[in-house]
């Protein structure tokens, strides 16, 4: 579920690029983005505050590649 915090968008490729080139761009963009948010941003964001990372092609649904549960969600899951 999407939180109330900021959402960032990074363009990593074009549909005319090869799948390999786009994949390499995704890996590099994730590395640079997480480093920027957690280390260099004036109001640093802790890694634990990153709740999800998704991929999307213009107009498509977002496909999750990373989801982090908050402690309340983990506790609810463990109580089942």
Image: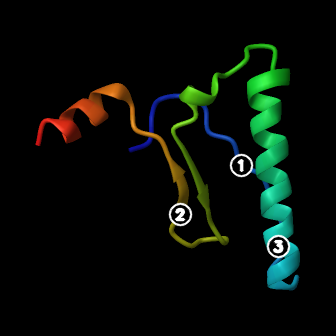
The answer to whether 59 appears left or right of 61 in the picture is: right
Q: CA distance from mark 3 to mark 2?
A: 16 Å
Of residues 75 and 44, which is closer to you in this image?
75
> Quadrant location of residue 47?
top right
- Residue 57 versus residue 55 in the image, above or below: below
The answer to whether 8 appears left or right of 77 in the picture is: right
Q: Which label's residue is closer to the chain start, 3 or 2?
A: 3
Q: Secondary structure at mark 1?
A: loop
Q: Secondary structure at mark 3?
A: helix
Residue at image mark 3: 22
The residue lying at 40 percent from left, 38 percent from top is: 69
- Pointer 2: residues within 10 angstroms few (<14), some, or many (20+)? few
Q: Position of residue 52 (x, y in %)?
A: 53, 45
The residue lying at 19 percent from left, 35 percent from top is: 76
Residue at image mark 1: 9
**Which quadrant is the C terminus positioned in?**
top left
Using the image, tell me which numbered label, if any, was put on residue 69.
none
The residue lying at 51 percent from left, 68 percent from top is: 61
Residue at the extreme front of the image, as rendered = 78
> How many numbered circles does the render carry?
3
- Pointer 3: residues within 10 angstroms few (<14), some, or many (20+)? some
**Which quadrant is the N terminus positioned in?**
top left
Of residues 3 and 30, which is closer to you in this image?
30
Q: Are marks 3 and 2 in contact (CB under 8 Å)?
A: no
- Residue 48 versus residue 31 in the image, above or below: above
Q: Position of residue 65 (x, y in %)?
A: 57, 59
Residue at image mark 2: 62
Residue at the extreme left of the image, as rendered = 80
Q: Nearer the viewer, mark 3 or mark 2?
A: 3
Of residues 60 and 42, which is closer to you in this image?
42
The answer to whether 2 appears left or right of 16 in the picture is: left
Q: CA distance from mark 1 to mark 2?
A: 12 Å
């Amino acid at each position: 579920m999407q939180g109330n915090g900021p959402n960032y968008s990074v363009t990593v490729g074009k549909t005319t690029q090869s799948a390999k080139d786009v994949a390499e761009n995704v890996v590099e963009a994730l590395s640079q983005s997480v480093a920027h948010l957690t280390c260099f941003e004036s109001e640093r964001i802790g890694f634990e505050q990153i709740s999800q990372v998704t991929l999307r092609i213009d107009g498509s649904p977002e496909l999750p590649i990373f989801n982090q549960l908050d402690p309340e969600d983990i506790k609810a899951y463990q109580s089942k």
